[in-house]
Image (cartoon, grey):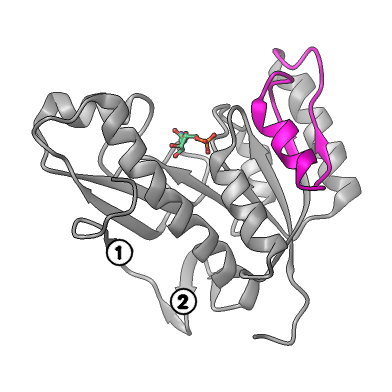
Amino acid sequence: MSARAPLKLALLISGRGSNMTAILRAALAQEIAAHPAIVISDRVSAAGLASARELGVAAAAWRGEARQGTFEEMLLATLEEVQPEAIALAGFMRILSPAVVTRYLGRMLNIHPSLLPAYRGLHTHARVLAAGDTEHGASVHFVIPELDAGPVILQSKVAVLPADTEAALAARVLATEHVIYPRVIDWLGTGRLVWRAGAPWLDGRRLETPIVEDFRAASVGG
Ligand code: GAR
């Protein structure tokens, strides 16, 4: 247990928020060194907003969110007020402008459902199935202005099974997301993970390649 205060965290979501819930639960149980200060959604209808409030975490969303400028103005004003030390994008489907990303460079994480650099963008599970890949997974990475291109910290690897549907594969990957994302946030919170000179460092060493956790033999996600 580190002596420092837990990392003050803002979480950005767009939908169901299962990654957000995994992070909130771990933080509230003091299993990770993070204090969730606020959840922000770019969609007022995001189911994760209610889940956050049920866990006692403040949640915000604004009508008129369709205009990028409006959302980012509200977002920045809120972040200015809350002053989080780090931001976790958790199923946040809006592309943030380079100005916002640069402002939080080295302090903003994202989870993406593929083994980056493979399959940036959308519909990763369907694309993996269409390609006939035998392995798939998720990646936690620092956010840079280029989409899904920031340095990857930790990846989960799962098997693609012959009978997989898109939904089955997505569920298998998602279960591992709930393991790896809280872990990376804990690394940031404890100071094991830092951003220095434009690169991630873990335990005092520059992270040249992602750490890969192999879930292929694990039962997580079924
Ligand atoms: C997750 O699979 C996450 O990796 C993905 O959306 C899902 C959100 O689920 N994110 C992206 O595709 C980002 N480009 P959740 O709302 O239940 O966490």
Vertical arrangement, residue 87 with respect to residue 127, above or below: below
Residue nearer the viewer, 50 or 145:
50
Label 1 residue SS: strand
- The answer for how far apart the CA atoms under marks 1 and 2 are is 15 Å
Range drawn in magenta: 39-66
The local crowd at label 2, few if under 14, some if 14 to 19, many if 20 or more residues have their Cα within 10 Å, is: some
User: What x and y, as percent, mark residue 87?
Assistant: 67, 51
Vertical arrangement, residue 175 with respect to residue 50, above or below: below
Which residue position holds label 2? 202
Which residue type does callout 2 highlight? Answer: Leu
Residue 130 in sight from this viewpoint: yes
Is 214 situated left or right of 83 in this image?
Answer: left
Q: Is 40 contained in the magenta span?
A: yes
Q: Residue furthest right?
A: 81
Vertical arrangement, residue 197 with respect to residue 69, above or below: below
Q: Is 41 contained in the magenta span?
A: yes
Which residue type does callout 1 highlight? Answer: Glu
